[in-house]
Every structure is written in C-alpha cells, then in structure tokens.
Amino acid sequence: MKYSRRSFYGTTAPASLSPVPYAQAENIFAQNHDGRLKDICDMHVHAAPDTKERSVDEIDLALDAKNAGYRAVMYKSNAWSCHDRAFLVRCAVSEFECFGSLCMNACTGGKVNVRAAELAANTAGNLCKCIWMPTIDSVYQNESEGRKGGGIPVLDGRGAVLPEVVRVMEICAQADIIFATGHSSPYESLVMAKKARDVGVSKFVVTHANSLIWKLSRDKIKELVDLGAFIEFCYLPCLWGRGTKLPKFRRMPKSEFVSFVKLIPERSFVSTDLGQVGFPNPVDGMQSCIDMMLGNGVSEKEVNLLVRENPALLLGLKKADGQRKNTTF
Ligand SMILES: [Zn+2]
C-alpha cells in the first residue's frame, strides 16, 4: 500500500509510523494547480493533531501547500498550541514558511493568559504569528449557543478592555505579531480595536468578518479599518450548508462574499478556514476560492492583495509600504 500518514488516523500500531521520507507522501490534490497558487499565504487553516478530526495533518498540509507554490500557511487550533509544532513541521518540510498561532481558550487556563502569550511569542523559531482572543470558549459564542454566564471575557463589567487583554496587545505590538479578535462580538471587536490603536498594535485583525454571528456590516468594517484594523474573510461559509458535513449553516452566496472582499481589499485578506473532514483540502479550497473571485468581478490586483500581499505583510514576510497607511474609502 502506498505510504500515507493520512491513512494512519484511527490506527494504533506504532509500527505504522516507520520513517518513510516525507517526499514520498502521496499527493491527494483533487486539482492540478499549474502554478496558479504561487505565493499564496493562507493564515487560517486547521490541521491534525487537533481535538476535532481534521482532513489533513500539519506536515501534509505544508507539503501540499509547498508543492502548489504557496509562500506560507499559518495553523490555527482552537484547542491547543501549534506555534511550537510549526518548528518541527519546518524540520520535516524544508524551505517552506509555516507558522502557528495561539488561541486563548480552555488550554490557556480558561482565561486570556498573559504568561501563555509571552511564552508563545518567545518560543524557538519565533513562529507564533498570531494570538487569538477566545474563540470556541468566548463569552459571545457561549451566550449565542445558550450557555449563559460562561465563557472567557475580553471586556469587564463596565465594558472596558480587561487588563490582561491590554497586556496581550502590548506583547503582540512588541513582538510585531497579530492580535486577532477570535470569536469576540462585533461590539467587543470595536472596543478592542480602539484600545489596540492606543496601545500601538500594528497588526490588529478582526476575524471571520463574513461568518455567522461575527458577520459585520459595511459601516462597521469601515469603522474598524479607520481604527487600523485588517479584516479577515473566510471562504468556508461559501462551502458549508445543506448536503455538507456542516448542514446547519446557511451557505453564503458568491455575490455576498465578493461584496465583502471588494469593500476594502487594501486592508483585508481571505483565508480558507478549511481543514474540516468532508470539505476540500485547504489547497484545493483556496484554488476554488480564487477562481470564484476572479469569475465574479474581483480583479487580479485585488486577489493579489487578499491572498498574497496582505497576509504576507501580516506574517512579517514583507515590510509595510508607506502607501498602506493612507488608505481612503
Ligand atoms: Zn477556524
């Protein structure tokens, strides 16, 4: 049988993990990308190991992305750290830029944990490029799912940004890494954006701005960008829905997705948020996302900003140019 670590999921025999060169791993692309994904950076992908089953592991994803011509990927795990594993993925997959991130959830002690942020920012390789505020354990998500009184707050009872959140902003500013809003509410994101501007965070990202309960109005996006934010749009909502493994969510029409990404591409980026079982490989997903954008009125220049230039800038792969600060609507 052809070697594949993918086929090992669910097996327990350690003998299965014999050292076969990674270069021999099977390529499971559904599409031939023909260099069309050159220099892509996907800053939001979920890969194994994780607490949820994933369609691909971190090493195979790095290989897939590298083979397709990507410049970089950044892993996200809601349950655990992945910035430390990114170091090892780089040992296995040479000459490819993979990064990790850290979400403030149960794994950080059920709070926005300053020490965890400090340690992540100081882990070998400096591969933690993003600290996410609480995602699956956020107050907003808890409340929206009917779990009153639970979740990790980012604001205090008076609506001010909690001191530990401010401290994490300072750590991100100093390390020049992304401070991401996670699954905070639009209101919480706005309050944090104001504070982050005062603190001097240059890479403040409002995430999932087109998804479910985090979906932002046009005016809110403009307000956040005026405060210095970058806005993340995820492709996943264009794929889920009836007949998929995430049937309860309404699929986002292409036209709606396009209207989001065309709003202010100079300060936005597109990530796939893929890696779920039953959905396309993140690399195939990125290709179909780009094809969809190009086929629906998004220009090559805008696509470049959304999936190449802005994510590269946020990952520290390219210095900001003076132009970006003068963005106007
Ligand atoms: Zn995600």
Image (cartoon, grey):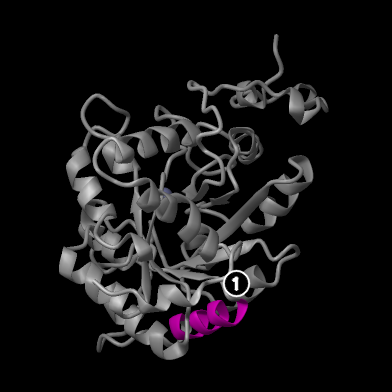
Ligand 1 lies under 8 Å from the Cβ of mark 1? no
Q: Is residue 173 magenta?
A: yes
Prevailing secondary structure class for the magenta stretch in the rendered image:
helix
Question: Does residue 92 appear to the left or right of 317 in the view shown?
Answer: right
Crowd class of label 1 (few under 14; some 14 to 19; many from 20; radius 10 Å): some
Is 48 drawn above or below residue 110 in the view shown? above
Task: State the extent of the magenta-drawn residues as a range.
Answer: 165-175
Q: Amino acid at mark 1?
A: Ala
Residue depicted at x 18% and y 39%: 253
Outermost residue toward the right?
A: 19
Q: Nearer the viewer, residue 118 or 125?
A: 125
Secondary element at image label 1: helix
Location of residue 220 in the rendering, given as x and y in whole percent from the top left corner: 20, 70
In this view of the protein, can residue 82 be seen by the observer?
no
Location of residue 101 in the rendering, given as x and y in whole percent from the top left corner: 56, 60
Q: Is residue 124 magenta?
A: no
Choose top left, top right, bottom left or bottom right for residue 11: top right
Is 293 drawn above or below residue 72 in the view shown? above
Which residue was labeled with disc 1?
A: 116
Q: Nearer the viewer, residue 161 or 312?
A: 312
Residue depicted at x 28% and y 74%: 328
